[in-house]
């Protein structure tokens, strides 16, 4: 059994700064594994251990995603090996394009039973890659996955739905996107980090992959900040703390916050 | 006798700052198996320096340093300023000779340290960021566990011997552990090498990096190309608390900060961030930074005890380097730490290399580090300036001298249509009005001459 975890190596927007002219400066933001991807690796690691499956990390992107440091950071979380496509033509690539490349890597690896991804990427957060990837592979995609057990061909997948939880049985290959809080990823220890340096990393040329042209091109043509909510300008007199607290509770109830 | 497990590495270095990286790099160059552990997510992410690196030492370690490393500017202009509330008197020394050969450069550790760690990796060091070492592993001293025929610690002292480090549930073992974990070295303390430092040996620094266009910096600081200015400030910048301020030019930013003595800060009941804000807002400092954007802000402890801070730096199975060994030097004119880190690292790599060669990593076997360090320019300088910390503790340095100098010069420059007096007589009058006495001038002159 082969399980692929598709992870992203990127910078956290919280570390970027936005200049007065609106230009985003990424130079001080350090790249790392996208925030929710360790959750996906942890869930996959659990399933791989239970089923003696091989766990393969896949990432695609511009130069930098395949440095030894980047590969080790991913491998130290429990992957058995990594397959990486590092090509500057993928700089600024859209989610559909990246998902198509990941799909091509999955096909190239061959006999993959399951692909697991994080909830969303920290930098884009469009939640698109798992579904487009599944579409490219002709597999079902399941989002908000909280746990996975069972065997290939008979997977039991828990997923969160509004107001509760569901358990699915999946009979064939699938793409699963883990929920952000599916599990708490462990912090790699020194031995994990040392072992990571000895694990195989395969670099694949983008040109060597069969990536079909996308049937549609998606371009971001507009951006806006969220609309600012009108403030109520409600001030409470705090000379009598008990009364102020009661008023505060009343005001919060009125707007439905409590 | 228990069998000693084969160590995972020859040497484990804890802390990927300048001292740690240089030690690891040189040992890897000797062909040793080296692990470099760093607590920050990436080397440099937790490290902070004022920003001036006297670079001759590191150029010997990395011959291409000035061209390859991310250095900011080459310092050709040094200023020392006595800053008063409404006046300032300074020494301004600019010299083209300082550019060739380059003597000092400004650096930003967030850029320099990753470069150093990269050089370590190239040399074969296993670099492991994102790991916090919880404690050193120790075993009973030499007598209890000599390993078969290899007398790794035959000449050692009694007591505990360091055999590795522990982080989380993992333990890794090495023949030598290098504590390069900074001024608050938990490792050195954990191993019982260093007691808690007295407050007057410690200072706290607050520093900002303020982004400005490079043309603006060159115009404001009178620079061309990649030349740089280092300004040291004493007096009103610290509101009279023992310490000083600094402004260093980077390529497209200015490093600005204050460093104040902890004991004086506590005694005067002042808050270091208030002092820093006061410095930034000073009428003679603010214009340098006007229009700039805050890019970094940080605080750091600084060891200022000089020679007195350096205690034991070698024990069975472990050495201490850089800030962790208390290696900083404030001579009044120059504040040094990073170059001492380099020198101690070079000495440590030499001493450890010899100890590994002789298969004796006991305290006695590692003592070559101490000898090499005190034979180096850095060790010599620590001795030369041994009296500087005590001299710089005089509060006269931080308030009254600056005002006295300004009063003398005011007498000379303020032509108020009254007949002029000779400068000497102006000076005498200024001294008479100052709380300073002639005996202070004489004694401080002599003490300063000896200490600095």
Image (spheres, coloured by chain):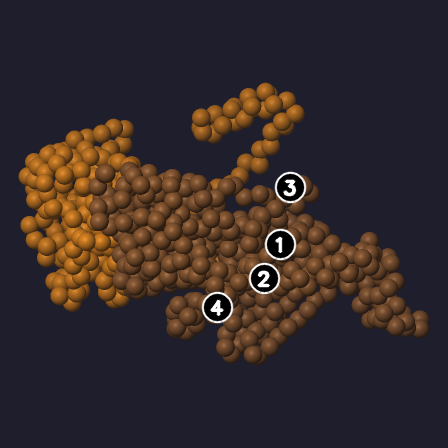
Chain colours: A orange, B brown
N-term mark: 4 or 1:
4
Q: What crowding class fits label 3: few (fewer than 14 Cα within 10 Å), some (14-19), or many (20 or more)?
A: few
The label nearer to you, 2 versus 4, is 2
Q: Is residue B191 left or right of residue A197?
A: right
Q: How many angstroms separate mark 3 from mark 4 (CA)?
A: 35 Å
**Which quadrant of the figure contains the C terminus of chain A?**
top left
Q: What crowding class fits label 2: few (fewer than 14 Cα within 10 Å), some (14-19), or many (20 or more)?
A: some
Label 1 element class? helix
Q: How many angstroms separate mark 2 from mark 1 (CA)?
A: 12 Å
Label 4 element class? loop
Q: Is residue B182 left or right of residue B317?
A: right
The label nearer to you, 2 versus 1, is 2
Label 2 element class? helix
What label does residue B389 carry, if any?
A: 1
CB-based contact (under 8 Å), mark 4 and mark 1: no
What label does residue B384 carry, if any?
A: 2
On the image, the x and y values in percent for residue B308 come to 56, 51
N-term mark: 2 or 4:
4
Q: Mark 1 — on which chain does it sit?
A: B
On the image, the x and y values in percent for residue A104 come to 14, 57
The residue depicted at 78 percent of the width and 57 percent of the height is B440
On the image, the x and y values in percent for residue B159 come to 38, 39
Q: Is residue A163 left or right of residue B404?
A: left
The residue at which mark 4 appears reads as: B55
As drawn, B222 above or below A238: below
Q: Quadrant of residue B111?
A: bottom left
């Amino acid at each position: 059994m082969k399980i692929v975890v598709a992870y992203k190596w990127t910078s956290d927007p919280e570390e970027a700064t936005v200049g007065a002219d609106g230009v985003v400066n990424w130079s001080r933001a350090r790249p790392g594994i996208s925030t929710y991807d360790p959750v996906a690796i942890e869930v996959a690691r659990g399933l791989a251990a239970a089923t003696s499956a091989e766990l393969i990390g896949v990432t695609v992107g511009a130069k930098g995603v395949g440095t030894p440091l980047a590969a080790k950071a991913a491998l130290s979380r429990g992957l058995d090996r990594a397959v990486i496509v590092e090509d500057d033509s993928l700089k600024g690539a859209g989610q559909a394009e990246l998902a198509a490349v990941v799909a091509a890597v999955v096909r190239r690896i061959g006999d993959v039973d399951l692909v697991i991804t994080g909830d969303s990427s920290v930098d884009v957060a469009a939640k698109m890659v798992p579904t487009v990837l599944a579409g490219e592979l002709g597999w079902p995609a399941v989002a908000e996955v909280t746990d996975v057990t069972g065997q290939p061909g008979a997977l039991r997948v828990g997923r969160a739905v509004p107001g509760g939880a569901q358990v699915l049985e999946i009979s064939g290959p699938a793409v699963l996107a883990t929920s952000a809080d599916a599990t708490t990823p462990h912090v790699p220890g020194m031995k994990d980090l040392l072992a990571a340096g000895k694990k195989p990393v395969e670099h694949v040329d983008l040109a060597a992959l069969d990536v079909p042209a996308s049937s549609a091109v998606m371009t971001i043509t507009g951006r806006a900040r969220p609309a600012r909510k009108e403030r109520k300008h409600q001030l409470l007199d705090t000379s009598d703390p008990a009364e102020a607290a009661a008023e505060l509770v009343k005001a919060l109830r009125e707007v439905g916050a409590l | 006798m228990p069998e000693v497990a084969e160590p995972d590495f020859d040497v484990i270095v804890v802390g990927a700052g300048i001292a740690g990286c240089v030690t690891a790099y040189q040992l890897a160059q000797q062909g040793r198996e080296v692990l470099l552990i760093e607590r920050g997510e990436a080397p440099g992410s937790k490290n902070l320096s004022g920003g001036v690196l006297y670079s001759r030492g590191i150029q010997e370690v990395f011959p291409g340093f000035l061209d390859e490393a991310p250095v900011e500017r080459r310092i050709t202009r040094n200023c020392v300023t006595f800053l008063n509330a409404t006046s300032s008197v300074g020494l301004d020394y600019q010299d083209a000779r300082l550019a060739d050969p380059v003597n000092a450069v400004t650096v930003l550790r967030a850029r320099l340290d990753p470069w150093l760690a990269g050089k370590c990796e190239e040399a074969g060091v296993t670099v492991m960021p994102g790991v916090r070492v919880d404690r050193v592993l120790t075993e009973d001293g030499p007598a209890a566990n000599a390993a078969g025929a290899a007398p790794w610690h035959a000449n050692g002292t009694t007591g505990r011997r360091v055999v590795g480090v522990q982080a989380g549930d993992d333990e890794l073992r090495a023949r030598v552990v290098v504590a390069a974990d900074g001024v608050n070295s938990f490792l050195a303390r954990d191993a019982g090498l260093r007691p808690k430092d007295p407050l007057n040996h410690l200072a706290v620094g607050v520093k900002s990096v303020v982004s400005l266009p490079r043309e603006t910096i060159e115009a404001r600081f009178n620079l061309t190309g990649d030349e740089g200015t280092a300004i040291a400030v004493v007096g009103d910048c610290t509101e009279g608390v023992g310490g000083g301020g600094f402004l260093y030019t980077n390529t497209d930013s200015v490093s600005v900060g204050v460093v104040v003595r902890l004991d004086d800060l506590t005694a005067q009941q002042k808050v270091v961030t208030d002092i820093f804000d006061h410095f930034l807002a000073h009428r003679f400092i603010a214009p340098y930074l006007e229009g700039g954007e805050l890019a970094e802000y940080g605080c750091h402890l600084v060891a200022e005890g000089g020679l007195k801070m350096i205690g034991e730096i070698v024990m069975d199975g472990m050495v201490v380097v850089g800030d962790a060994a208390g290696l900083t030097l404030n001579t009044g004119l120059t504040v040094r730490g990073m170059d001492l880190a380099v020198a101690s690292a070079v000495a440590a790599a030499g001493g450890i290399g010899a100890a590994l060669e002789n298969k004796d990593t006991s305290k006695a076997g590692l003592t070559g580090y101490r000898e090499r360090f005190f034979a180096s320019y850095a060790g010599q300088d620590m001795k030369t300036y041994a009296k500087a910390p005590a001299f710089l503790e005089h509060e006269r340095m931080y308030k009254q001298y600056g005002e006295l100098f300004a009063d003398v010069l005011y007498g000379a420059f303020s032509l108020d249509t009254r007949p002029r007096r000779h400068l000497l007589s102006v000076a005498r009058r200024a001294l008479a009005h100052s709380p300073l006495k002639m005996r202070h001038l004489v004694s401080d002159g002599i003490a300063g001459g000896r200490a600095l």
